[in-house]
Amino acid sequence: MEEKLDFEERPENNERKRSLEYISKLIENARKLNKQDDLINLLEIQKLINRKKYGLVWEEHEEIVDHEMAKQIPVFTEDIKKKMNGVKNDSHYNFLLVGDNLHSLHLLQKTHYERINVVYIDPPYNTGSKDFKYNDEYIDNNDRYVHSKWISFMYRRLKIAKQLLTHDGVMLISIDNNEYANLKLLMDQIFPNGYVTTIHVEMSTVQGMKVRSAKNGNIVKNAEYILVYSKDGHHNVMKHPLYNRTNYDHHYNQFLIKENNYYNCRPISEVLQKHQDITRQLEALGLVNKGHSLSNSKIGIYYDSSELVREFINKNADLVVRDHTSVTIKNNVDYLEGKVYPYFNGKRKYLIQKNKDGIYTQKISFSTKLGKSDDFKPEYGPLKIRGDWWKDFYLDMGNVNKEGGVKLSNGKKPLRLIKQLLKATSDKNDIILDFFAGSGTTGQAVEDLNKEDGGHRSFILATNNEGNIAEKITYKRMLNINDGYASHESTPINLKYLKTDHVDKNSDTLETDLLKYVKTLVELQHGIDFENSSFRIVTKRNQIARLDLKNVTSVYMRGRVHRMMIPFEQERYELANVKIIDIPEEFFGEELREWI
């Protein structure tokens, strides 16, 4: 009888188990002997051994904002002078949140918990070239904690961002090879089973100084990455696939000619041969010898080379077909051998042909391959669905500094890239969040998409104001778009500009202080503006009777105040057809509970 090997796939587990058992005995003995110092130390060792070892491990670092929130409550205040009301007949607003994005995310937990459909961020890449600040100091490559500080910084923000996503929400993160590996492990920890793919974006070519580097044996950087995660783990996040132009598929080499209730099928070369202007052009291009017949095997070459061939095939794309798979026909109809018939199964139409063996095959029309591409220069022609390789975005980089009418010295992403990411992953009424807003490309991408497809997507941009970036760049770009800075055609925007402020947790009037800032949270939550709408807000008991209900449709009311309404007051609101919407107590409920 063969001896069974004593094999453990993870032998370190046995070592760990033995160590824990031994420490447990020491702990038990320390308790019996009342050795408190030993007990405390042994319990700490037990905790360390029990700690998870697989995955990303890093030194945790605190931030100044953590200490601020221990003593102060972040709130939003509005800069009324910066409000934009480009769409006069629309009460819906987008938002620019200015301040540390950890504060902004903390407040968004109150207003947008599980409400964000798509998060796109372009965080600092931590290259060591003054692109990443931690606690007001730039982190360079000489810092021994260069990576752990970045990971700590990202971890806090990504954890909250996950909570903001809808159950099927999607997160897209731009990154390069400096922190890609760490970010991938970090996201795997925050989004277990949520990884969808990594999109590779061609952001540069081997030219200029890169040629010399490549000749010296270096593998030069041409691509950046976009990590894609879904909250619930679903992989089909591309709701609206993107397409690139491709060459003609030479298998589409048959042409249908209508006759009675069926089609005769002919080689497409025979049909093209009858058009003298086409044959003359092909002869002039050197693709056909004068007086010779066209070749059906060269249809792809003719299409890609001849404008007249392309025009003819595109115009008759429904009649240009290729063979496809065999199909089973349910109804027993006497179809003629070799003829092509339209066949309906429910609402779907097929083209079928019976061969000499009585087997039916399907024909596919070239029109199913035709469309306008999503390339740098969109073309109408045969398409292929784009995968995880997004090429030619280096072509956009030549104009990126001019996009939006603002300049950003480092890290500005092409508008087409962000626009296509959102086009692919969002629906027309989705909420898009970018909490590393930078130059505001995400905001313009949302507005451009809405303009193109009639959507009503809304955006929330969050950024700090270091170097007045929020005012001079992010906000300026929104103004430029609203004013039609480049195309003489504006894209009207409704935007509210909110800044983070703080309320002292130890204030003797904390409840009154916090009530002052409920208004901005309600506006943020519902995307509205109380000043220019039929909406009103009531946070105090004495405001119920004083409120003029003329032209008012909805009143957002503090729940406690709503419960204090007497029958007469309720009747007044009902007769005016005013809807009362309770303001969530959790806006500042946790902070007030601590105060009490």
Image: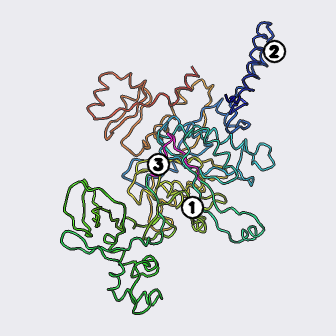
Tag in front: 3 or 2? 3
| Residue found at the far bottom of this picture | 290
Single out the mark in the foreground, 1 or 2: 2
Which residue is labeled 2 in the image?
37
Sequence-earlier tag: 3 or 1: 3
* Marks 3 and 1, how far apart at CA: 25 Å
Examine the residues drawn in magenta and state their main secondary structure: loop
Under mark 1, the amino acid is: Pro
Q: Nearer the viewer, residue 403 or 348?
A: 348
Q: Classify 421 as above or below 253.
A: above
Mark 2 neighbour class, 10 Å CA radius: few under 14, some 14 to 19, many 20 or more = few
Percent from the top left, x then y, of residue 191?
A: 57, 39
- At a point 31% along the width and 41% down the height, the residue shown is 551
Looking at numbered disc 2 in the image, what kind of residue is underneath it? Asp
Horizontally, residue 386 falls left or right of residue 314, namely: right
Q: CA distance from mark 3 to mark 2?
A: 55 Å
| Vertical arrangement, residue 562 with respect to residue 291, above or below | above
Q: Residue placed at 44% from the left, 79% from the top?
A: 298
Label drawn at residue 414: 1
Residue 39 magenta-highlighted: no
Q: Which residues are magenta?
A: 226-238
Where is residue 168? Give x, y as percent.
47, 41
Report crowding for label 1: few under 14, some 14 to 19, many 20 or more residues within 10 A (C-alpha). Answer: many
Q: Is residue 236 magenta?
A: yes
First-in-chain label (1 vs 2): 2
The answer to whether the residue labelled 3 contacts the one labelled 1, judged by CB atoms less than 8 Å apart, is no
* CB under 8 Å between discs 3 and 2: no
Three-letter residue code for mark 3: Asn
